[in-house]
Image: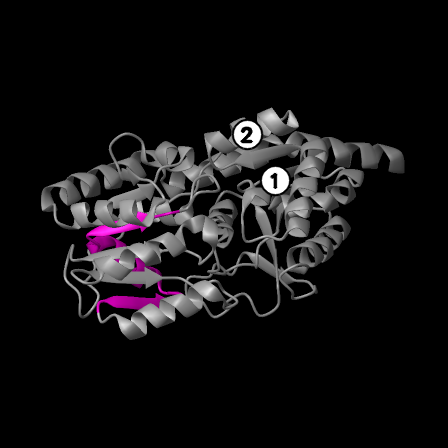
């Protein structure tokens, strides 16, 4: 996968490069070209049909490899993780960057070949309501294996690092998600600047989507409400979004929005962006909303307070009445909207730039090349 002069890295555990599915995919889409520019051979493993090879922004120096797996909600991560890891072991990169603790089960394969492994542990997946009892058990077991067999771990929030230290006896290198401030964009047709409430989220219970819909029932009597997202596989919350959009003229469900510029425009012109995520660390959507200058109302969690700090957001409880009152208050207060918008942009610029995030990953990967070089030297000695 590389040469004696060029370090090589395999990135395992996402849908591939380039892909736009979620936070991990966004991070890999930004990190991979950066690593190439800094002298790395980069291979990103993915799933057939999940990448966009005709993407005009694709860096063709990044090698995309697809392996086989089982396309089901329960087995896709594990099966694709296994086949990607098996292929990487055969190709022997200098370092492996692995996303998601569910892939921790395959770390012994890499360890046996002397390949250093850095695992982005994501959030505390076993606390997410969307997973069955079996799914939660798999994630927790994967975390235990990751704690034992990984060379290093990355946590995207200090609160996640604290939780890992407390539960598993190991911490991790803090590297959050990044964001770029977009250029000035036109407002979504049919809407007005600062005139609507916005939700951007996967439709799962821990993102407080249900209570937001409850709040929207009344809020949409006087204000426009836009919901972006879906469950990805249908279900009760998707059905409810469709029903609300059909019944309430001022409730608008856009489904999944693929276009980054359109998403940035929605954040940039929102009167109030509700961020209801209750589980996880640094959320990519929250960071990008900050960079776009959205006036943010977040569900009050330690994770959101870490990201927003003291000035870049307002906070609310999860009850529908609290959400509605807080959104209505922010939508009717242009001065507060401007204060929050300016503070969010500044915090994103100083604490969450992609340049600093990518540089931190590159430094961490390079710090593990010594063990990779020792592995090569030992192999050469054995051959003599």
The circle drawn on residue 261 is none
Q: In this view of the protein, which residue sits in the foreground, 181 or 4?
A: 181
* The magenta stretch spans residue 264: yes
* The magenta stretch spans residue 253: yes
Specify the quadrant of the image occupied by residue 311.
top left
Specify the quadrant of the image occupied by residue 376.
top right
Residue 34, image x, y percentages: 47, 46
The residue shown at (52%, 27%) is: 162
Give the total number of marks visible in the rendering: 2
- Could you tell me which secondary element the residue under label 2 belongs to? helix
The residue shown at (34%, 58%) is: 213
Q: Which residues are magenta?
A: 250-276
Q: Which residue is mark 2?
A: 163
Residue 110, image x, y percentages: 74, 43
Task: Compare marks 1 and 2 and give the one earlier in the sequence.
Answer: 1
Report the side of 118 relative to 246 (left or right): right
Residue 62's place in the image compared with 359, above or below, is: below
The residue shown at (61%, 68%) is: 48
The residue shown at (71%, 51%) is: 85
Instruction: For label 1, count other residues whose C-alpha is less than 10 Å away and answer few (under 14), some (14-19) or many (20+).
Output: many
**Residue at mark 1 to residue at mark 2: CA–CA distance:** 16 Å
| Quadrant location, the C terminus | top right
Q: Outermost residue, bottom direction? A: 246
- Could you tell me which secondary element the residue under label 1 belongs to? strand
Viewer-nearest of labels 1 and 2? Answer: 2
The circle drawn on residue 119 is 1
Residue 332, image x, y percentages: 12, 49
């Amino acid at each position: 996968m590389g040469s004696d002069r060029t370090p090589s890295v395999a990135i395992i555990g996402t849908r591939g490069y380039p892909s736009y599915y979620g936070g991990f995919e966004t991070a890999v889409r930004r990190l991979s070209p950066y690593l190439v520019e800094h002298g790395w051979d980069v291979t990103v493993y993915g799933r057939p049909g999940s990448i966009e090879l005709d993407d005009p922004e694709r860096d063709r120096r990044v090698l995309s490899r697809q392996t086989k797996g089982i396309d089901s909600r329960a087995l896709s991560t594990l099966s694709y993780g296994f086949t990607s890891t098996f292929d990487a072991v055969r190709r022997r990169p200098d370092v492996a960057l692995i996303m998601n603790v569910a892939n921790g089960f395959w770390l012994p394969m890499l360890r046996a070949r002397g390949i250093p492994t850095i695992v982005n542990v994501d959030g505390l997946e076993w606390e997410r309501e969307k997973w069955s009892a079996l799914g939660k058990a798999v994630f927790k077991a994967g975390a235990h294996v990751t704690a034992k067999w990984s060379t290093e771990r990355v946590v995207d929030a200090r609160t996640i690092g604290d939780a890992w230290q407390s539960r598993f006896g190991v911490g991790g290198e803090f590297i959050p998600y990044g964001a770029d401030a977009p250029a000035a964009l036109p407002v979504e047709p049919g809407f007005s600047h600062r005139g609507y409430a916005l939700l951007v989220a996967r439709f799962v219970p821990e993102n407080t989507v249900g209570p937001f819909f409850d709040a929207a029932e009344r809020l949409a009597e006087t204000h426009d409400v836009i919901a972006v997202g879906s469950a990805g596989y249908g279900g009760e919350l998707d059905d409810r979004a469709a029903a609300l959009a059909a019944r309430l003229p001022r409730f608008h469900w856009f489904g999944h929005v693929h276009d980054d510029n359109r998403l940035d425009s929605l954040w940039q012109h929102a009167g109030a962006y509700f961020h209801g995520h209750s589980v996880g660390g640094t959320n990519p959507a929250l960071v990008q909303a900050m960079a776009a200058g959205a006036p943010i109302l977040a569900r009050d969690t330690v994770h959101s307070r870490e990201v927003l700090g003291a000035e870049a957001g307002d906070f609310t409880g999860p009850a529908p009445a609290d959400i509605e009152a807080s959104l209505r208050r922010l939508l009717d207060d242009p001065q507060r909207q401007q204060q929050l918008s300016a503070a969010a942009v500044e915090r994103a610029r100083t604490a969450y730039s992609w340049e600093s995030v990518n540089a931190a990953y590159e430094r961490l990967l390079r710090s593990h090349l010594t063990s990779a070089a020792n592995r090569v030297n030992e192999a050469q000695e054995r051959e003599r």
